[in-house]
Amino acid sequence: MSSSTSKTDKDPSGGSPLADALQQNQQATEEVQRAADDLAVVHAVLDTKAAKGAVDDESKRAVAETAQVEKRLTKSVEKLEQVNETLQKELPKQA
């Protein structure tokens, strides 16, 4: 139950700059993933309404745009996850 154990990848106050960068990047990854998930829900709702013919041209453009934004966010999550993996591998080398 000692608080003196060092976990640099979990402790933002005492970690190295690399550990801090990893933690911030992990948080950003989670936020981007949540945004992509939320956008997927919005897209599904709009797409369902469009399929029922309950939308105008502007709504159809919104459906197409949400799909593109969701794809961009998903690619960003993948890139962030790759950076997280690299940071996690490099942290032990700094110790």
Image (cartoon, grey):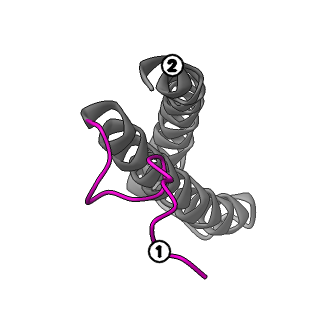
Residue displayed at 32% across by 47% down: 15
Whether 10 is among the magenta residues is yes
Q: Marks 1 and 2, how far apart in space?
A: 24 Å
The C terminus lies in which quarter of the figure?
top left
Asked if residue 49 is positioned above or below residue 32 in the image, the reply reads below
Q: In which quarter of the image is residue 54?
A: bottom right
Name the residue located 44 percent from the left edge and 47 percent from the top edge: 8
Q: Give the range drawn in magenta.
A: 1-16
Left or right, residue 63 beside residue 49: left
Q: Which residue is drawn at 55% across and 65% down?
A: 38
For residue 90, which numbered disc appears in the image?
Answer: 2
Residue 84 is left or right of residue 31, and the answer is right
| Image point (54%, 77%), residue name | 2
* Amino acid beneath label 1: Ser
Q: Where is residue 56 in the image (x, y as percent from the top left)?
A: 47, 60
Q: Which of marks 1 and 2 is nearer the N terminus?
A: 1
Q: Where is residue 87 in the image (x, y as percent from the top left)?
A: 48, 26
Where is mark 1, residue-wise? 3
